[in-house]
Image: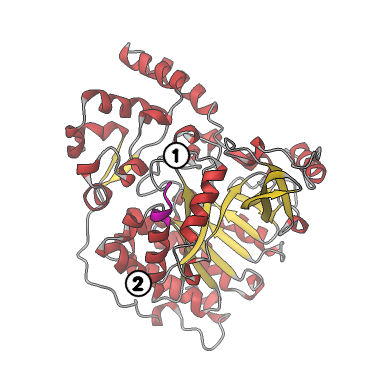
Amino acid sequence: MSAQVQALQPHHIRPLAQIPPAGVDFFDPVPFKVYTQRDLDRIAPLARLSPEQRFEMKVVSSVLPFRVNQYVIDELIDWSKVPDDPIFQLTFPQRGMLAPEHYERIAGLIRGGADKAELERAVGEVRHALNPHPADQMEMNMPRDEHGKRLEGMQHKYRETVLFFPTQGQTCHSFCSFCFRWAQFVGDKELRICSSEAAELHGYLRSHPEVTDLLVTGGDPMVMKTRHLRDFLEPLLQPEFDHVQTIRIGSKALTFWPHRFLGADDADDLIRLLTQLVEAGKHVALMAHYNHWKELDTEAAQAAIRRIRSTGAVIRAQGPLVAHINDDPAVWAKLWKLEVKLGLVPYYMFVERDTGARNYFEVPLVRAWEIYREAMQQVSGLARTARGPSMSASPGKVEIQGVAEIAGEKVFVLRFIQGRNPDWVQRPFFARFDDKATWLDQLVPAFGEEKWFWQDEYKAIREDLLAAV
């Protein structure tokens, strides 16, 4: 901690050097061994698959990012159940992730020995057809400073919450095959959202006292060295940032590399940092991404959870409902029960977003609601904190509250959990029932209404923001 920040601490907050690392189960350091597309032939268990299956993986991973590590391969995947194993589906490319026409185009070029430039051009065109940045996040969510300069590494969609994408955290220990931020990882600078400018972040927060929550996201901030994470977070202990009450860190590390919190070189330093933030009065929330109970069912994962909880940080668990992985109420009920048992707070069930491999992973909204409802019926009140199914659409987070018949019409009952205008939040509205719809833009207002109650205002907000681009 710098002398300046230390001098500003209340007398009951211990300086960093005085905070001992929290107790931890003894885990020997484990080397991090990662595989990407060029290493597919080196992943030993894949040898049991057919040559055609391995070729399909090569084709799909030419378009969508692929990255997996030895922990996932050894600890999380049941290779006797491949390709149906949920964690295999979560991490390894499948042919159905590309539309048939896209798959055949790329497969034909690879089979024909196309030159690198031709293949890259085709891959780029396919990627741009996959809606790499849904919900207008590039155009509508990026704030500007007092001089009108767009702050490339931030998003400020909702009044209370700012998202920050540190450059050092723009990868993950493994990649989820359905990831809605897949465009961050394909090497196209035009598609990336990131910043290494701590001063820009702090300056923006300083000038926006309405912001109570900072979400550090990615990628995964937990791939960063702790010293880099501290550069962004430690200055928030100064009194001028008292309005930033909550620090959230979005991470999949508890699934993909729990050794980050156990035997990594700077694991103790990370635990000290979290403890320091909590003791300084910040609410620290690790926003953990889980899709299946198997991710919680290893000794290392549970030891990492215990260690994080010992700092006073809260672990909130969220993830999308996706076909081939968790489209089963029994899976969600078991996941939520295990989360509560381990001291986690079930937070969100999301609807798979309209980007990337959505056609392979999406589930009809009515089925998503049925799965949510049936899973909720199997758990106690402590697990019923999970909200959803929730669509993170451009106007806001829209929750499917149920299906009902009103005045003789079958409808979806919807509400905003969060909105571009806070006045929309918690206001119910109704959509005509559609058993095939998978996203908000496929729904139409019920009862013969011509538009949603929020539609005109959202259009005006959108036009204003796009005019500034």
Viewer-nearest of labels 2 and 1?
Answer: 2
Q: State the image quarter where residue 8 is shown.
A: bottom right
Q: Is residue 217 visible?
A: no
Q: Secondary structure at mark 2?
A: helix
| Residue type for callout 2 | Arg
Residue 403: percent from left, percent from top: 63, 49
Task: Report the side of 450 relative to 151 (left or right).
Answer: right
Residue at position x 49%, y 39% from top?
362
C-alpha separation, residue under disc 2 versus residue under disc 1: 29 Å
Q: Which contiguous range is marked in magenta?
A: 327-332
* Residue at 34% from the left image edge and 72% from the top image edge: 306
Q: Residue furthest top?
A: 112
Q: 70 or 170, which is in the foreground?
A: 70
Frontmost residue, 166 versus 338: 338
Q: Which residue is mark 1?
A: 185
Residue visible at 40% across and 73% down in the picture: 309
Q: Which mark is residue 209?
A: none
Q: Is residue 12 visible?
A: yes
How is colour applied across the structure in the image? Answer: secondary structure
**Along the horizontal axis of the image, is 388 left or right of 292?**
right
Image quadrant assignment for residue 66 = top left
Residues packed near mark 2 inside 10 Å, few (<14), some (14 to 19) or many (20 plus): many
**Quick check: 169 above or below 300?**
above
Question: For the residue labelled by badge 1, is the local secondary structure a helix, a strand or a loop?
Answer: helix
For the residue marked with disc 1, what is the amino acid? Phe
Residue tagged 2: 307
Q: Position of residue 41 (x, y in %)?
A: 21, 31
Which image quadrant: the C terminus? top right
Mark closer to the chain start, 2 or 1: 1
Residue 115 x, y percent position in the rendering: 36, 14
Q: Is residue 298 above or below residue 242?
A: above
Is 67 covered by the magenta stretch? no
